[in-house]
Image (spheres, grey):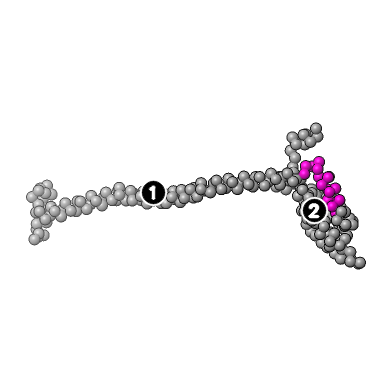
Amino acid sequence: MISLDDLTNLDPKNIGNWPIIIKTLLILVLCAATLFAGYWFDTQNQIGELFKVQYKEKDLKESFKTKQLQAATLPKLKEQLEQIEYILKELFKKLPSNAQVDALIRDISQTMLASGLKQELFEPQYQRERAEKGLYIKLPIKLRAKGDYHAFGKFVSGIGAMNRIVTQHDVVIKSSKGGVLTLDMQTQIYRYIEDETQKKKRKR
């Protein structure tokens, strides 16, 4: 056993003559202090860096999965884009030029008369003509006609069968005396926006 006197009589300059138990305890304390200092000044920082790397690895894995999915769907998206571009080209072919608008307006008027309707109003509203989305120009035409349901149906079918895009809006049908019906509606025609080069070519 180590007494209090043994501890008080220890000579710091002569550690080699200390009792074995005390020297062992001293070595253990120094080892523990060394390990703690190593953890505090080095290992702790390394653990912090490790956590950062682990989080970064997780983010990189998620990013990789996302990019892998995008790469897998890219060919399909390109195919869909080509289909959309083809459809747009086909639709633009149905849009008349500015020079062809008058002919389209006449076709609509003739379709109305050929359907058996009595034309009371046919007013292209040029003052309301406006560009849409920088792709085309929309021109509304205000219509009023009289006839029966059969004539109305024939007129609508005739408009739908045109090789140009013509839409119909704000349709109102009113009945009057003698079974005659009055049709009020707005038809819209569309033409593509011509640049200066196209206009010069058309003038030649």
Q: Check residue 53 in the rendering and tell me which mark sits there, or answer none.
A: 1
| Nearest-to-viewer mark from 1 and 2 | 2
Q: Are marks 1 and 2 in contact (CB under 8 Å)?
A: no
Relative image position of residue 202 (x, y in whole percent) = 79, 36
Name the residue nearer the viewer: 24 or 135.
135
Please say whether residue 189 is one of the residues in the magenta stretch. no
**In the rendered view of the protein, which quadrant contains the N terminus?**
bottom left
**Dot 1 lies on which element?**
helix
* In the image: residue 83, left or right of residue 64: right
Relative image position of residue 131 (x, y in whole percent) = 74, 46
What amino acid is found at the position of numbered circle 2 in the picture?
Ile
Tell me the residue at 27%/49% (across/down): 38
Name the residue nearer the viewer: 19 or 147.
147
Q: Considering only order in the chain, which callout, 2 or 1, is on the residue closer to the N terminus? A: 1
Boundaries of the magenta span: 96-112
The residue beneath circle 2 is 159
Relative image position of residue 163 (x, y in whole percent) = 77, 48
Residue 64, visible in the rendered structure? yes
**Dot 2 lies on which element?**
helix
What amino acid is found at the position of numbered circle 1 in the picture?
Val
Name the residue nearer the viewer: 163 or 51.
163
Q: Which residue is situated farthest in the top direction here?
A: 204
